[in-house]
Amino acid sequence: MSQKKTNYLNADVELEESTPAVKKKSKKKQNKTLNTVKHVLGVIGTTFLSLFMIVIITCCIVAVTLTVYIMQFADSAFDVDLKNVDLSYTSFIYAKNSAGEQVEIKRLSGDENRIWVNMEQIPKHTQDAFTAVEDKRFYEHDGVDWKRTVRVTISTLFNGYGEGGSTITQQLVKNITGDDRVTPERKIREIFRALNLEKQYTKIDILEAYLNRVPLGGTVYGVGSAAYYYFGKTVDQLTIAESAILAGMTRSPSVLNPYANLERSKERQLYALKCMYEQGLITTDEYEAAKTEQVKFRLIVEGDAYGYKDPRYDEYYGNNANKDENSDGYDDEDTYEAYRWNEYEITQNWYVDAAIQQVIEDLSKAKGMTYAEAKADLYKGGYKIYLNMDMDIQEKLETFFKDPNNFFYSYDKTAIEENCAQAAFVLTDYRGNVVALAGGIGDKPGDGCFNRATQAILPIGSTMKPISVYGQAVDKDIINYSSMILDKCITLPEGTSWPSNFEGDYGSGGYIPAWYAVQQSKNTTAVRMAQVLGIDTCFNFLTDKLNVTTLDYTYDKAYSPIALGQLTQGMTLMELAGAYQIFGSGGVYYEPKLYNLITDYNDKTVIEQEPLGDRVMESDSAYITNRLLKAVTDTTNGSGRYAKIDGIEVVGKTGTSNDERVLAFAGLTADYCGVIRLGFDDNKNIGTTNYIYLAQVWHNFMVNVVNEDSTKTFAKDSNVVEKKYCTETGLLATSKCKNTAVGYYKADNLPKTCDSTHKDGEYVKKHGGETLLVPDWGTQKAEEDTSSTSSN
């Protein structure tokens, strides 16, 4: 038993001895596992830490790179004067209506039709309409709506597109800079510029600038131009409904404006009204009223005339008819309706054509520009031009000139439109103001067409004589009203007799009084006056005193051009009118002016033309010459007798150029100086059988100008006296003079008294004209046209 026990004990001992060995081995395994876990965790931790550090470093690199990138395109130095940004503004032309009020008759615009309006002029509901649609947090953000920007950015990243996220400030920046590329770089610049702009200007300044720059369809920019273009009114008259239409089209004005798509325009209007209502900018009543308001547009929105046909106008904008299709937004008494000639649309009359031309030339001189630069400046400079045109008289003149029957006994309609004898007319007052003008017979071919009143340079015939020789001869006391002048041609060195009179004779060889020489338009006496005065004196008076710019300094310094009006090129009708007005203004020359004032869009004066005249002749001399011209119209055999108007004193002078190529007449009343000319543009012969006498044509128009308020007679000069003269001698008459008439004389330079002998005209030969001859005429260098003739 003891052995078994011993064996048992041995077994136990062995068991006991073996147990610690097992425990030791398990502990090692645990340590090994723990180490493995630690190692794995270490590796994972290191990996994650490395990745984290990589991310951090990458983020830092990206952030630095992005910062460098952003700063590369940021424009923190963006600085702009909102009041002086170079913009295009619409220019306006004004004229006086029959009530003497200045009314707008024409607008000029280039690529951008813009009328600048101040914030005070823009209704609050118009301002609210744009902020509601375009930037509802405009008054809260600092130039960038970050919430909206982030939303749009995310939408763009995930969807490939997003609605516009630009604030009004950002849009203004884009409009100012013209930087509208769709790139991240541009957007970054825009954001920085917007932030910078908000630091420099108030919200009111920014909104005002935006509302004057926002594109609103075609060439229309800003609410000022849009108010007129769409509704025919000024911006301060816009209703809530109209404001919503404008605000609704900003996203795509070319397709959302009512002239392009009436239905979409209405949808956008309702959207804008909804935005205004939801943002508490209008009341419920205002909202409901605006939705159903009948909006009247300036142009028709149905019909082919404006390129769009939509019969649903009544459905969208009320049940009343829209404006008449012929209306252009002006009241009838304030403007002219456009008329058509062939395929051309006429939007301005002859006067406006001429005024635009003159303004461009004057701006060119005043601002040191080329003609092209001045023209571009006019159409984008926002100028206001105030014309001297009388709208009532101009309209009558336009109507008169459209009918060829007023000029010809018969005519070919095709020839009238293509190649006919043409005419022009210029009417001025005695302060240099051009009251009306017309540049051609028949329908006006188009805007800016050739204007014969201001651009045609043609001969003027015998209308030259009073302004070049007779007026000066009176002023220099060489002749008086009844001075006797020898009516006889001159024999040139080569033996040729020159000049001939209109009738074909070479003078009677006797003596005729000055008034009769003018009345019958004698070439012989006119040449003698020019000889006594001297060619240089006559020429310089025309160029230096009367501002005639078209004379040829080489070929027109001769007797035929100066005394008879047979000029190398001619004169413009405007220059002829300016020259003749001295006989109604008391000898004071006023350069003809089409306008009196030009201001910029801020109403600052750019050019002002005050009626400052230059005295070129004594007032008594001008009045006596006026009386010489009266002999042309006031007698039964005067060449201008058809110009007479019952109850109105008319004086004037006719003219015919060589070979009857051009006819002219200058006529004066106490209120107006009117000149008319007829001839072919290519200066060919017009014949003498088909045209109505120009003096008669002048009369037929002027009877529509004069009225019961017109001045009936010319004011007599205080230094002029009326005296009887002897018709045989031209000297002051005595009781022994059987034949007398009344003449007009300077009080301080009366003629001598007739000695009453009248013997065979000996007194006349001795004292009345012989001294007017220059003995050595034949030594003069004669470069005359020996065939030249002139009108009677």
Image (tube, rainbow, N blue to C red):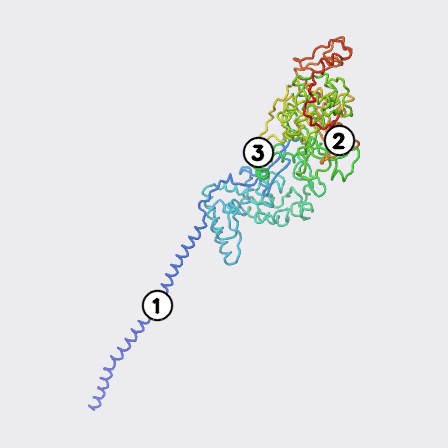
Q: Residues within 10 Å of mark 3 (few under 14, many from 20)?
A: few
Location of residue 227 (image quadrant): top right
Q: Amino acid at mark 3?
A: Lys
Labels 1 & 3 near each other (Cβ < 8 A): no
Q: Which of the two discs, 2 and 1, labels the residue nearer the N terminus?
A: 1
As drawn, the label of residue 365 is 3
Q: Position of residue 278 (x, y in %)?
A: 54, 48
Q: Is residue 124 left or right of residue 65?
A: right
Report x, y in % for residue 688.
78, 31
For the residue marked with disc 2, what is the amino acid?
Asp
Residue drawn at (78%, 12%) of the image: 760
Give the camera-side residue of 59 and 532.
532
Q: Dot 2, how many residues are within 10 Å of its Cα: few (below 14), some (14-19), or many (20+)?
A: some
Residue behind mark 1: 43
- Rendered view: 271 above or below 754: below
Determine whether the residue tagged by mark 3 lies in a helix, strand or loop: helix
| Residue at x-position 78% and y-position 25% | 504
**Alpha-carbon span between mark 3 and mark 2:** 39 Å
Callout 1, which amino acid? Val
Which residue occupies the foreground of this view, 20 or 494? 494
For residue 659, the mark is 2
Residue 108: x percent and y percent?
A: 61, 39
Q: Earlier in the sequence, mark 3 or mark 2?
A: 3
**Pointers 2 and 1 in contact (CB under 8 A)?**
no
Secondary element at tag 1: helix
The residues bearing labels 2 and 1 have C-alpha atoms spaced at a distance of 117 Å
SS of the residue under disc 2: helix
